[in-house]
Image: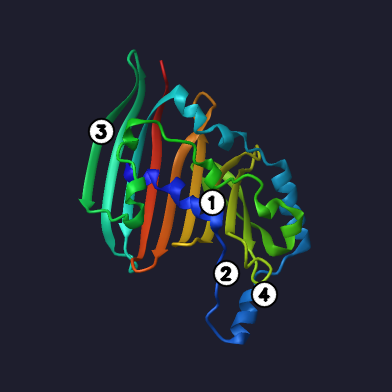
Amino acid sequence: MRALRLLPLLCLATLSACTVPEQFDGTPEDEAIWKAQFAQDPSEQRVVFDLMGEMSTSGMDNAFGNLRYYDFTRYTRVDQRDDEERLQASEQHEVRHAMTNQGRTFEVLREGLQGEFDYGFFQNFVSTNVEAEDPGDVTPYVMPDDPPYLKPEFYEAYQYRLRPDTLLFDQAARVVEIRARPDDGDDLNIRRVSLYLDRRSNQLVAASLDRIDLAFLFREESSFFIHIRQTAEGDWVPYNTRFETLMMMPFEGSRTLRTVSSYYDYAPSR
């Protein structure tokens, strides 16, 4: 699946990136109301810090590595849309990953292609055979090393909130939301993070991250989401992933690539 190989390249923008802050388009009075939404409640911030301090990330850390112990099916769809959100191309693959006497096998159960993908500058970096290997670990996109929102020097640049509980698969989860604040957080690449913690175990079961980067040749706005679940054997494995990247390049307009994958029919490899 070609677009899956594009994502690691896009994040190279952060090596030489600066952030363009969110802009408010309205009257000064409306802007003041908008900024007031980012005010930090100190008591709520302490609750969020306590939850994150008790949070376990072992499931997320090991989920993709655990795939090697299982047979499973992965369905992936990649869409490309233009600057008016019109669908230009779509590709779908359903692949059964299994262990046999001959080693790891990859059986394409169904596939389809509609339209023609236009990767522009990134065409030379796109792989065409990702369905012939197990997926790589993409958790660093939602759980980067040493993120700024966990550093004391950036506490004033982010707003920390506890959102209403939600259900993920069959799990009740607490939701923590972290947002870059206007002015103080304007120069931060990571704009929003949502963490979903299982209410019983405080295990991180899902996470999303939005970021904005501006490199020398293009602007990138990206959103990443990973959801994991436990198998009957008790191992944490991927359940759903979603990655969306909006690229804006000089003289080429903008294009959006959206990749959605689902993992199911897990069985321990023989």
Q: Earlier in the sequence, mark 1 or mark 4?
A: 4
For residue 165, above or below residue 217: above
Q: Marks 2 and 1, how far apart in space? A: 19 Å
- Identify whether 269 is placed above or below 147: above
Sequence-wise first label, 2 or 1: 2
Camera-side residue: 5 or 175? 5
Image position of 62 (left or right of 43): left
Secondary element at image label 2: loop
Name the kind of residue labelled 2 in the image. Pro
In percent of width and height, residue 88 lies at 26, 59
Residue depth check, mark 2 versus mark 1: number of the one nearer the observer: 2
Q: Amino acid at mark 3?
A: Leu
What amino acid does circle 4 point to? Answer: Ala
Find disc 2 in the rendering and name its residue: 21
Q: For mark 4, what is the residue?
A: 36
Q: Which residue is mark 3?
A: 109
